[in-house]
Structures are given as structure tokens and as C-alpha cells.
């Protein structure tokens, strides 16, 4: 484990403690060396070298240098004739050569120990950074040798899997945490690999001792080692909180989309009520006419049948209008199914027909008769088109009435379907196009800046995209592109 490696090379933090311990080591080592020397044991010098090596390794470079200098002077003072002097020139030539050799060896040993110490400190710092990064991202590292089942876990992997650090890592303990429904997946994608893999990427569930579930993402690779063994290295990420936040964001997005739809419906109530009043008035008129035909002698049944047929037609028209309004204002989870976007366009244009008439705007529809189906939620697509059309209506507020025209066009693309709403308004201001679909950005005086942002979110959730650009002549075009249902299946 990373923490154990770091502790093994750790240095006492306080300088006084490090230098004090170094002096203590030398104070213990020097009498031993002197005793060995008096008994003519040739390991006295080696004992001093060990003290230097230990000081560098355990107390750091500075204490190691002090220990080296002290050892060199101790050898001259206590071990070489004449004793009890530090003057190296008092030594005979042969003894001087031995002293210089000892000094060079000790300094070389200090240099080597210092280099190793620096490497250890860098390793310790890297391990600390890695441990902090893993803890912050809740990501552990796992290494597995197949088929030997030799396993390594990082400190964070222990925490992700819910084991204490004194537990030996093993495949059995990892499998014990896996949700029963995901055991086969984990075996095939991780524990029983038979060949190298450049990328391992899957998610599964684990069950903690208290019964709670965690969502785990595994990302790694498998490499072939000598002897035909497979070495699997992977990052194990706890995605539980991220999944929870993502679900919460989706719920908030749905709530916001619902509020937006209700706001749009409030603006359309007057227009829709006018449209409904027309078929209701026709129903009343045809009913009164039918009663008069029945009161005649003899009753004019053919005319009565015609009046009843007209009543049915107008009732169906009113019902369709009410149904469209209810669908757009209802609060429900997204339900995707194969859809013909032409029908969605027709329904939305019918809903906004009165709004367009009040603003003297002509709606031109150009729909591809062979339009491919898309897999989508009808209510959410209605919301996007209503937003595009209402923005187009607002954009033409200053356009001369004779030029107020909005065009809705549907076309098949290579593997997608596109619907464009083209207006004849002022167009998109310069420098705004890149921010048009950002949340809370609006060019309207009283706008909230969430309509187009929700449109983009809905389109991306369906695997598509929304775009906006200025036309060559005047006005702007808003486009939604969705993948064909057949492309999704493929």
C-alpha cells in the first residue's frame, strides 16, 4: 500500500529531533568501533560506515553530512596513529593514504545515500499527491495478475470497496462485494481475461456490509507479461454520488421544463380559447339546425344526418386542440417512441395558428413526405418547436406586416432528420450566436434565458443537437437535428 511505503521512508519533521537522533546514533556507534579496533577486529571502520548510511537514510541529507564529517574526524582522532589529533599531515605516508581513502569512501557513501534519499522523498511526495488525488476523486487503483489472482489495492481502493487496511487484498474479497446481478459481467470483463485489452471500461454495483449500494466505474487496460500471464491495471471510481447528482439534475431539468411549458401555455390560453370557441359555436349552430330539420313535417332526416356529421367533425377538432394543450402542459417522465416529426410540426402550427394570425404572420410549411422516423418524446419536441416559433414571432415584431413570414421545413439527412424554423426578423446580433443556448442568457428585455437552454438539453438527451444561424438575406434559422430511429437501432 502507498501509505506503508511513505511511512517506511518518513523523516522526523523537527530539525532538532533529526540532528539529536543522529548524534545519539554516533554516540552509540563510536564506542563500539573503538572497542572493535582495540581488539584488532577489522570491522571497526565498517561500523562507522553503517552509522553514516543509517543517518542519511533515516534522518536526511543534512544530518547525514554532519555524520560523515564527524566520522572522518573520529577516524583520524581515535583510530590512526598518532592518536588524539586531527592533523592529517602528522600521519605517515601510508597511514595518510588510508585516511584519505576512508574520507573519500565516506563522502562517496554520503553522496550515494543523498541521491537515494532525494529519490525516496520524490517517491513519497508523488505517493502523497496520488493518495490525495485518489481520495478527492474517490478513485482507487487495482492491479491483478491473471491467472495467478495476485492482487494489489491502493489505500483509496480499500475505502471504495469498504475494507479495512489490515485486510489482505484478494479476488475473492472483491467478488464478495459485487452485486449478484453483476457478477457474470465483472468476471468476463475483469477477473477472467484471457488476452490483452487496450481499454477496459464498464460499470457495476457493489453491496456494502450495511446493505447500501455503490455504483462503481472501472477503467483500465490488460497487458501480456512474460510467461503468458495477463496483468490488469485499472482505476476503480465510486460513481454513487455523481450518479445521484446527475439524477437530481435531470429531475430539476424536468421540473424547469415543466414550468417553462406552463408559462408558454399561459401565454397561449387566449389564442387557444378563441380557436376552441369556433368549433363549439359550429357545434351549437349545427345542433340547432338539426332540431329544426326534425321539427319539419315530415322530418328531413338527410339534412339531420348532415348536421350530425358536422357536429362530429367540429367536436373532433375541439378535442384535438384541447388534447394538444393538455399534452404540452402535463408533467411526466420522458417517454420515447418512434415519431413522425411532420405530425409534431403540424400539431404545433395548429396550436400557434391563432397567435400567428393576431400578429399578421404567415406560416409556410414545407415537409418532406418521406421523412424518416425518430425515437423521441413527443411533448418535449413540441416544446422545442413552440420555443422556436415563438422566438420567431417575437423577432418579427418590427418587421413590416407584408414581410412577416415564418417557414417550417423538414428534411432527411444522411442518418438524421432536421426541422428548420426560418423567420424574417432582425436576426441574431453579432457575437451572440455562441451564447444563445447558454442557461440564463437572453436578448429579450423580459426574457428568462432558459427556453433555448432547455431546448439544447432536450435535443442532446435524444442524441441530437440544436443550431441557430443568420440567413443570407434577413432573419435567422433555428434547427433541430435528431438521429433517425433506424440509425439508433444500427
Image: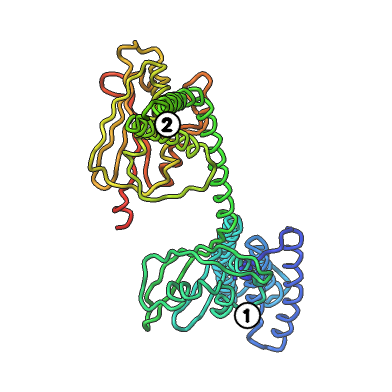
Q: Secondary structure at mark 2?
A: helix
Q: Position of residue 321 (x, y in %)?
A: 44, 33
Q: Is residue 471 left or right of residue 285?
A: left
Task: Name the quarter where the C terminus is drawn.
Answer: bottom left
Task: Using a 10 Å C-alpha cutoff, classify the residue at mark 2 as few (fewer than 14 neighbours), some (14 to 19) or many (20 or more).
Answer: many
* Residue under the image location 60 percent in, 55 percent down: 241
Q: Is residue 31 visible?
A: yes
Residue found at x 28% / y 29%: 365
Give the image location of residue 306, x and y in percent. 34, 31
Q: Secondary structure at mark 1?
A: helix
Question: Which residue lies under the disc numbered 1?
Answer: 46
Tag of residue 224: none
Viewer-closest of 357 and 299: 299
Q: Which is nearer the eye, 27 or 81?
A: 27
> Mark 1 or mark 2: which is in front?
2
Query: In x, y percent, where is residue 46?
Result: 62, 80
Which residue is rendered at x = 37% and y = 15% of the image? 360
What is the C-alpha distance between the residues marked 1 and 2?
89 Å
Q: Residues within 10 Å of mark 1 (few under 14, many from 20)?
A: few
Q: Is residue 322 left or right of residue 170?
A: left
Q: What residue is shown with label 2?
A: 386
Q: Residue 293, position in %: x, y? A: 39, 27
Q: According to the image, what is the colour scheme of the structure?
A: rainbow
Q: Which quadrant is home to the N terminus?
A: bottom right
Left or right of 337? Residue 241 is right
Amino acid at each position: 500500500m502507498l501509505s506503508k511505503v511513505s511511512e517506511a521512508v518518513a523523516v522526523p519533521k523537527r530539525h532538532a529531533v533529526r540532528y539529536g537522533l543522529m548524534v545519539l546514533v554516533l554516540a552509540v556507534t563510536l564506542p563500539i568501533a573503538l572497542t572493535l579496533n582495540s581488539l584488532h577486529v577489522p570491522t571497526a571502520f565498517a561500523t562507522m560506515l553503517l552509522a553514516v548510511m543509517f543517518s542519511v537514510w533515516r534522518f536526511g541529507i543534512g544530518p547525514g553530512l554532519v555524520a560523515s564529517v564527524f566520522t572522518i574526524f573520529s577516524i583520524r582522532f581515535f583510530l590512526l596513529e598518532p592518536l588524539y589529533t586531527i592533523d592529517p599531515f602528522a600521519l605517515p605516508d601510508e597511514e595518510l593514504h588510508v585516511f584519505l581513502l576512508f574520507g573519500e569512501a565516506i563522502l562517496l557513501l554520503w553522496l550515494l545515500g543523498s541521491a537515494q534519499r532525494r529519490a525516496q522523498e520524490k517517491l513519497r511526495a508523488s505517493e502523497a499527491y496520488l493518495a490525495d488525488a485518489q481520495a478527492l476523486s474517490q478513485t482507487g487503483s487495482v492491479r491483478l495478475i491473471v491467472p495467478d489472482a495476485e492482487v494489489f489495492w491502493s489505500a483509496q481502493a480499500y475505502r471504495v470497496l469498504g475494507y479495512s487496511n489490515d485486510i489482505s487484498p484478494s479476488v475473492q474479497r472483491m467478488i464478495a462485494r459485487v452485486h449478484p446481478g453483476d457478477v457474470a459481467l465483472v468476471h468476463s470483463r475483469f477477473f477472467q481475461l484471457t488476452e490483452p485489452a487496450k481499454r477496459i471500461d464498464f460499470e457495476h454495483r457493489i453491496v456494502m456490509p450495511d446493505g447500501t449500494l455503490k455504483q462503481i466505474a472501472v477503467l483500465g487496460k490488460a497487458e501480456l507479461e512474460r510467461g503468458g500471464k495477463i496483468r490488469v491495471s485499472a482505476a476503480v471510481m465510486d460513481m454513487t454520488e455523481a450518479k445521484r447528482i446527475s439524477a437530481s439534475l435531470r429531475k430539476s431539468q424536468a421540473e424547469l421544463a415543466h414550468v417553462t411549458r406552463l408559462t408558454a401555455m399561459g401565454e397561449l390560453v387566449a389564442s387557444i380559447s378563441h380557436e376552441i370557441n369556433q368549433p363549439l359555436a359550429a357545434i351549437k349552430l349545427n345542433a340547432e339546425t338539426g332540431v329544426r330539420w326534425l321539427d319539419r313535417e315530415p322530418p328531413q332526416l338527410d339534412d339531420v344526418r348532415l348536421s350530425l356529421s358536422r357536429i362530429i367533425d367540429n367536436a373532433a377538432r375541439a378535442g384535438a386542440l384541447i388534447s394538444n394543450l393538455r399534452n404540452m402542459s402535463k408533467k411526466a417522465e420522458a417517454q420515447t417512441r418512434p415519431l413522425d416529426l411532420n405530425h409534431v410540426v403540424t400539431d404545433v402550427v395548429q396550436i400557434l395558428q391563432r397567435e400567428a394570425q393576431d400578429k399578421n404572420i404567415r406560416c409556410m410549411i414545407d415537409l418532406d413526405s418521406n421523412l424518416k422516423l425518430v425515437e423521441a418524446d413527443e411533448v418535449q419536441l413540441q416544446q422545442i418547436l413552440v420555443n422556436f416559433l415563438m422566438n420567431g414571432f417575437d423577432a418579427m415584431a418590427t418587421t413590416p406586416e407584408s414581410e412577416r413570414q415564418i417557414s417550417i421545413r423538414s428534411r432527411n439527412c444522411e442518418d438524421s432528420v432536421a426541422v428548420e424554423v426560418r423567420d424574417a426578423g432582425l436576426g441574431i446580433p453579432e457575437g451572440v450566436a455562441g451564447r444563445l443556448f447558454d442557461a440564463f442568457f437572453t436578448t429579450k428585455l423580459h426574457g428568462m434565458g432558459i427556453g433555448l437552454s432547455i431546448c439544447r438539453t432536450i435535443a442532446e438527451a435524444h442524441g441530437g443537437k440544436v443550431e441557430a444561424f443568420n440567413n443570407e438575406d434577413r432573419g435567422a434559422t433555428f434547427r433541430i437535428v435528431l438521429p433517425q430511429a433506424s440509425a439508433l437501432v444500427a
